[in-house]
Image: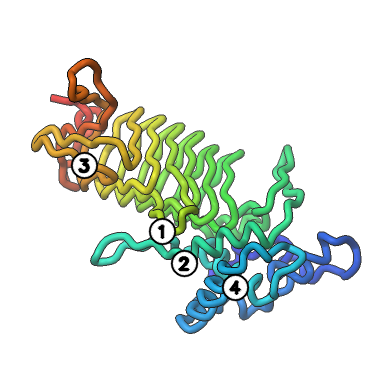
Amino acid sequence: MCAHCRGAISPATRRGRIRAGISCVSRWWRRSPIASRRRGAWHNWRRNSDVDKARAIIEQAWENRAQLSPAAAPREVCEAVDTVIAGLDCGRLRVAEKTAAGWITHQWIKMAVLLSFRLEDNRLLPGGATRYYDKVPGKFASYDEAAFAAGGFRVVPPAMARRGAFIGRNVVLMPSFVNIGAYVDEGTMVDTWATVGSCAQIGRNVHLSGGVGIGGVLEPLQAAPVIIEDNCFIGARSEIVEGVVVEENSVLSMGVFIGQSTRILDRASGEILYGRVPAGSVVVSGSLPAPDGRYSLYCAVIVKRVDARTRAKTSLNELLRGD
């Protein structure tokens, strides 16, 4: 079992079987796969046939989701859902993946995340100097020093990541929040008070500056998550939401807000884009005049394009100058 998979196992699993009859919550934990799955179940999703089986179970359960609850759910549904969450947690499964044709979203994995909320009761979660009460346990609830060392990332208190979020090696989580289904790849900095929303995909060597908001999306199922590709810099207090894709090697100045309806003006060509920041773009906040000229409306402006070599050699302040 890989280090990430060991960390994905819930505290209840590490404690072993829970004795019968102590409370209704304990009875649910005992019958749940979180507490009762066998060791081999953690590897099921590693084989394509098992992934296909889990997908079929989850898609069928989704059609009957109104009938599901922690007290009334088929064991195979619980096991399939929890297996997917474990796969997300250790990075073997992803909500979205980049292919030759572009980014694709796996709707059935989002179904599993949503079903997991129906299959778990709120419960007390320990949190150092405080406590929490939620359906989703913390990613690091069962980690010891060896597990953190094996994971190869840093977590600065009181940073919070939920179980089902993947954190890659050499990632630094300053006091921040990473939601379920998110993928944070190697070498990324998630700075203080930054938020990585549910299912968001963050590439390698990305810097999310202080207070950055990366939007999350679980519904509608067909909606794509926010994607920040490799080697991007997102300036302080910026917000990227609604499935926007920021392509590799791009730099966004502080306070840039981009959603699907935000106009993204390429200053060099005059072209207006929506929902996508092209690779190597340097972006600042701006405005465009209304058709009648009476007022201006917010937009994001691509002030220049840089390649990876220029990006590596040039300071951020130089890149962000508008001249």
Q: Quadrant of residue 294?
A: top left
SS for dot 1: loop
Q: Which residue is mark 3?
A: 273
Q: Earlier in the sequence, mark 2 or mark 4?
A: 4
User: Label 1 sits on what residue type?
Assistant: Gln
Q: Which residue is mark 1?
A: 222
Q: Earlier in the sequence, mark 3 or mark 1?
A: 1
Badge 1: residue crowd in 10 Å (few <14, some 14–19, many ≥20): some
Badge 4: residue crowd in 10 Å (few <14, some 14–19, many ≥20): many
Badge 2: residue crowd in 10 Å (few <14, some 14–19, many ≥20): many
Left or right: residue 17 compared with residue 272: right
SS for dot 3: strand
In the image, residue 183 above or below residue 208 = below
Distance from label 4 to label 1 (Cα)? 21 Å
Query: Outermost residue, bottom direction?
Result: 49
Q: Which residue is mark 2?
A: 93
Q: Earlier in the sequence, mark 2 or mark 3?
A: 2
In the image, residue 304 above or below residue 231 = above
Q: Are marks 1 and 2 in contact (CB under 8 Å)?
A: no
Residue nearest the viewer, comparing 298 with 79: 298
Q: Which residue is mark 4?
A: 80
The image shows residue 5 at horizontal and vertical percentages of: 57, 67
Q: Earlier in the sequence, mark 1 or mark 2?
A: 2
Comparing labels 4 and 3, the label whose residue is closer to the camera: 3
